[in-house]
Amino acid sequence: MVDINTHAIIAFKFSASNMINSEMLSNFFKQTRQKINKI
């Protein structure tokens, strides 16, 4: 989920289908420059 005003990522849903692709997940975290508050 992305805040439409600030474009900040406020939620990201993990599922079995997207967790299988660890390369995609790794790239997501590399692109995240903001602090991750909760996993």
Image (cartoon, rainbow, N blue to C red):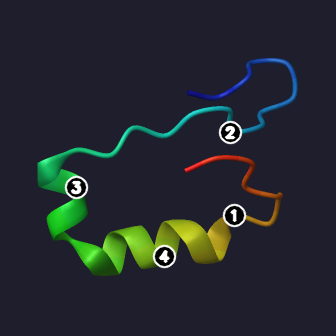
Q: Rounded to the nearest whole Å, what is the CA distance between mark 1 and mark 3?
A: 17 Å
Q: Earlier in the sequence, mark 2 or mark 4?
A: 2
- Do tag 2 and tag 4 residues touch (Cβ < 8 Å)? no
The residue carrying mark 1 is 32
Q: Dot 4: what SS?
A: helix
Residue 16 placement (x, y as % from top left): 13, 50
Residue 31 placement (x, y as % from top left): 65, 69
- Do tag 2 and tag 1 residues touch (Cβ < 8 Å)? yes
Q: Residue furthest front?
A: 38
Q: Earlier in the sequence, mark 2 or mark 3?
A: 2
Q: Rounded to the nearest whole Å, what is the CA distance between mark 4 and mark 1?
A: 9 Å
Q: Residue furthest top?
A: 4
Residue ID at (69%, 64%)? 32
Q: Which three-letter amino acid code belongs to the residue tagged 1?
A: Thr
Q: Which three-letter amino acid code belongs to the residue tagged 4?
A: Asn
The residue carrying mark 2 is 9
Quadrant that contains the N terminus: top right
Q: Rounded to the nearest whole Å, what is the CA distance between mark 2 and mark 3?
A: 17 Å
Q: Rounded to the nearest whole Å, what is the CA distance between mark 2 and mark 1?
A: 9 Å
The residue carrying mark 4 is 27
Q: Rounded to the nearest whole Å, what is the CA distance between mark 4 and mark 3?
A: 12 Å
**6 lies left or right of 7:** right
Q: Is residue 7 above or below residue 38?
A: above
- Do tag 4 and tag 1 residues touch (Cβ < 8 Å)? no
Residue 11 picture quarter? top right
